[in-house]
Image (cartoon, coloured by chain):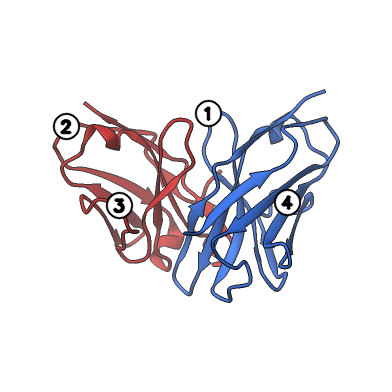
Chain colours: A blue, B red
Amino acid sequence: QLQLQESGPGLVKPSETLSLTCTVSGGSISSSSYYWGWIRQPPGKGLEWIGSIYYSGSTYYNPSLKSRVTISVDTSKNQFSLKLSSVTAADTAVYYCARNIVATQYNWFDPWGQGTLVTVSS
Amino acid sequence: SSELTQDPAVSVALGQTVRITCQGDSLRSYYASWYQQKPGQAPVLVIYGKNNRPSGIPDRFSGSSSGNTASLTITGAQAEDEADYYCNSRDSSGNLVVFGGGTKLTVL
């Protein structure tokens, strides 16, 4: 059974870089069928896709965040990571990682990690 | 703003049928997926593709699509179905991912 687990600091100072890692267990991140994605949810608000990465390193990002986002993959550790630079209070959110299935007419995320709350505050 | 539009809130009487909709131009070309999220929990996929349910999702959940609108139907809503529901698909270019704003379902 595939499981994903987010990890990283729960508190980040304004203007600094948010860094999170997602560890995949029960399956290989190098599977040729899947992308791996990050999604966030500000308190009391809806879901926002941040970006996704293929095991080869190919990425695609939300244009609204693209200038500040880097997603990378480490196949040797079965992990992928998120870096979001120059954070502000507006980046306070629960951050989720999820497997991203992408096909010609389809896109979905399953399963999801439990999520981790990141608060941006001095 | 989201390219997928959902009604903010919908209510249904216990045991009745409810349809939650998601509108967007990209839905003319791409299928929507649907997620259920209960308070304090991660979203759970309930419908993907044309109308597929992951293992463990009750068959009272179904999906459909017509024109620019995708729908999630719950036939015989149960108290445990009370949750937020989000649709997800590609954007109009097909290159990016978008979520709807979410619908809060209340089971009366």
Distance (Cα) linking label 2 and label 1: 26 Å
The local crowd at label 3, few if under 14, some if 14 to 19, many if 20 or more residues have their Cα within 10 Å, is: some
Q: What residue type is labelled 3?
A: Ile
Q: Splitting the image into 4 quarters, where does residue A71 fall?
A: bottom right
Residue tagged by mark 2? B14
Q: Nearer the viewer, residue B37 or B28?
A: B37
Do discs 4 and 2 belong to a common subunit? no
Residue A99 spot, x, y in % from top left:
55, 59
Q: Which mark is residue A68?
A: none
Tell me the quarter of the image containing the C terminus of chain B.
top left
Which chain is home to disc 3? B
Residue tagged by mark 4? A82
Residue at left offset 52%, top offset 68%? A102
Residue at left offset 49%, top offset 72%? A103
Residue tagged by mark 3? B57
Distance (Cα) linking label 3 and label 4: 30 Å
Give SS at disc 2: loop
Q: Nearer the viewer, residue B29 or A20?
A: A20
Is the residue B63 above or below the residue B80 in the image?
below
Q: Do the residues labelled 3 and 1 touch (CB within 8 Å)?
A: no
Q: Are marks 2 and 3 in contact (CB under 8 Å)?
A: no
Which chain is home to disc 1? A
Q: Do the residues labelled 3 and 4 touch (CB within 8 Å)?
A: no
In the figure, is residue A108 to the left or right of B1? left
Distance (Cα) linking label 4 and label 2: 42 Å
Q: Residue A44 carries which label?
A: 1
Residue at left offset 28%, top offset 37%? B81
Distance (Cα) linking label 2 and label 3: 18 Å
Do discs 1 and 4 belong to a common subunit? yes
**Precedes in sequence: disc 1 or disc 4:** 1
**Precedes in sequence: disc 2 or disc 3:** 2
